[in-house]
């Protein structure tokens, strides 16, 4: 199994402040091929979404669960081309560029659980006028910096999962991401109906963690001279 290669709030939950944060990748979602438009030109990019938990940014979304890490995500075109944003962020995250062999088919799903350092910027939506937070850069952890053990459950959604695993992963991602997935030809090729979302998550990022919290797992810190994936 492989995946080869923003965040406007509608609630009272505060926007994540601009700054640099230790983070850990907890979600990798292969959205698939979607219709898009850039500078008036229609495009059909193949998209993937990465999401990170921020262990230093806790919020009590559910009184019964107590404070949990905030989540922030970023969508990429699933490409490792010279100008691709995914390649730029992965190069910085790894702390070294890809080799020619790696570029022939890097499995993005291997990033799950990997620690990193995120730069987060703030902005205001042009049409909504609402503040939001976005990932402006991803980098390898600075020497001496540690990331706390993972709290939220890892999720990998890709189309070659077994049906039961695929549907479980599908139901674990936010509703607005599901809305994109079901429009893709990759989803259509599965020949299955969209399951009813009994625990729909809000469409705004950073407003709620995943519904289930797993036991904390040991941090997988990379050697200084070795990329984390």
Image (cartoon, rainbow, N blue to C red):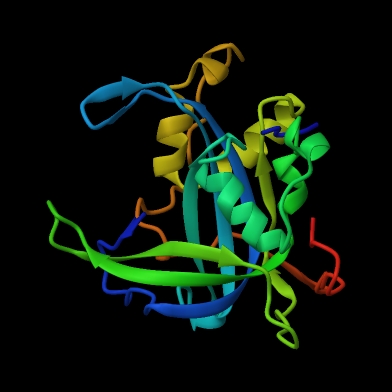
Q: Quadrant of residue 18?
A: bottom left
Q: Is residue 64 visible?
A: no
Q: Nearer the viewer, residue 194 or 94?
A: 94
Q: Position of residue 194 (x, y in %)?
A: 50, 25
Q: Is residue 143 visible?
A: yes
Q: Is residue 66 left or right of residue 148?
A: left
Q: Position of residue 76 (x, y in %)?
A: 50, 42
The N terminus is located in which quarter? top right
Q: Position of residue 200 (x, y in %)?
A: 44, 47
Q: Nearer the viewer, residue 208 or 112?
A: 112
Q: Nearer the viewer, residue 5 or 58?
A: 5
Q: Position of residue 135 (x, y in %)?
A: 45, 62
How many marks are shown on the rendered structure? 0
Q: Nearer the viewer, residue 138 or 8?
A: 138
Above or below, 138 relative to 182: below
Q: Is residue 2 left or right of residue 14?
A: right
Q: Is residue 142 left or right of residue 6?
A: right
The C terminus is located in which quarter? bottom right
Residue in the picture at 49% in, 56% down: 73
Residue in the picture at 32% in, 77% down: 14
Point out the residue furthest to the bottom here.
144
Above or below, 25 relative to 48: below
Q: Is residue 106 left or right of residue 8?
A: right
Above or below, 220 relative to 84: below
Above or below, 228 relative to 4: below
């Amino acid at each position: 199994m492989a995946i080869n290669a923003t965040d406007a709030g509608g609630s009272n939950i505060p926007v994540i402040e601009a700054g640099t944060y230790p983070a850990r990748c907890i979600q990798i979602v292969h959205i698939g091929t979607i219709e898009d438009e850039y500078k008036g030109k229609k495009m059909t990019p193949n998209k993937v979404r990465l999401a990170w938990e921020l262990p230093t940014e806790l919020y009590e979304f559910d009184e019964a669960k107590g404070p949990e890490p905030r989540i922030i995500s970023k969508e990429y075109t699933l490409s490792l081309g010279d100008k691709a944003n995914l390649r730029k962020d992965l190069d910085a995250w790894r702390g070294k560029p890809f080799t020619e062999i790696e570029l022939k088919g890097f499995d993005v799903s291997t990033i799950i659980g990997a620690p990193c350092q995120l730069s987060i910027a703030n902005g205001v939506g042009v049409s909504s006028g609402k503040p939001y937070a976005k990932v402006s850069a991803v980098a390898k952890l600075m020497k001496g910096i540690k990331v706390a053990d993972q709290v939220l459950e890892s999720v990998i959604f890709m189309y070659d999962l077994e049906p039961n695993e695929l549907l479980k992963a599908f139901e674990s991602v936010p509703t607005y991401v599901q809305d994109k997935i079901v429009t893709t030809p990759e989803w259509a090729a599965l020949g299955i109906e969209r399951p009813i979302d009994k625990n729909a998550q809000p469409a705004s990022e950073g407003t709620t963690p995943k519904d289930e919290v797993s036991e904390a797992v040991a941090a997988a810190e990379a050697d200084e001279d070795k990329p984390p994936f």
